[in-house]
Image (tube, rainbow, N blue to C red):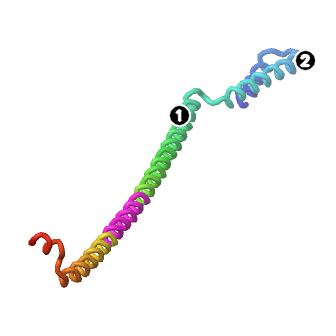
């Protein structure tokens, strides 16, 4: 702005033109200043590239965090599934062991019944032996 005023003063000092010419020059200079201000408002390429890089870095970091969180969730889900499966296997193992105990008890009860029957049969002579001897 100071440069424009200085340039205007120089122009006025150099040429004693009419006021109309001076007004035209001022208008022209003010439009040039406005254009220069517009150029200043446009970020330079380096600044724009830096901002874009920062934006990309932020996006990459956000994506990395999302992937990390997704992997964490997936690992937790997998761990929960494994724990559930382990608990299911424990229940199955207990059921198997219980079934084996019941079977063993049934077999022991069956043997005890057979022993009782055999014990009663031992008191009487067996006919099959008596017939075979004659």
For label 1, the residue is 53
Residue at the far bottom in the pictured view: 123
For label 2, the residue is 20
Mark 1 and mark 2 residues within 8 Å of each other at the beta carbon: no
Quadrant for the C terminus in the image: bottom left
Q: Residues within 10 Å of mark 2 (few under 14, many from 20)?
A: few
Q: Position of residue 82 (x, y in %)?
A: 40, 56
**Magenta-colored stretch includes residue 94:** yes
Q: Secondary structure of the magenta portion, mostly?
A: helix
Could you say which quadrant of the image residue 111 lies in? bottom left
Residue 79 against residue 97 in the figure, above or below: above
Could you say which quadrant of the image residue 41 lies in? top right
Residue 82 against residue 9 in the figure, above or below: below
Would you say 51 lies left or right of 96 here? right
Q: How many marks?
A: 2
Q: Nearer the viewer, residue 23 or 131?
A: 131
Q: Nearer the viewer, residue 31 or 134?
A: 134
């Amino acid at each position: 702005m100071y440069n424009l005023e200085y340039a205007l003063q120089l122009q006025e000092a150099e040429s004693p033109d009419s006021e109309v010419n001076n007004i035209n020059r001022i208008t022209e200079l003010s439009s040039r200043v406005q254009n220069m201000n517009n150029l200043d408002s446009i970020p330079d390429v380096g600044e724009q590239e830096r901002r874009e890089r920062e934006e990309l870095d932020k996006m990459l970091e956000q994506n990395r965090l999302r992937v990390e969180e997704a992997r964490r969730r997936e690992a937790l889900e997998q761990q929960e599934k494994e724990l559930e499966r382990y608990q299911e296997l424990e229940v199955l193992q207990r059921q198997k062991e219980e079934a084996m105990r019941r079977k063993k008890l049934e077999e022991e009860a069956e043997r005890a019944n057979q022993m009782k029957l055999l014990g009663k049969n031992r008191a009487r002579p067996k006919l099959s032996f008596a017939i075979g001897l004659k």
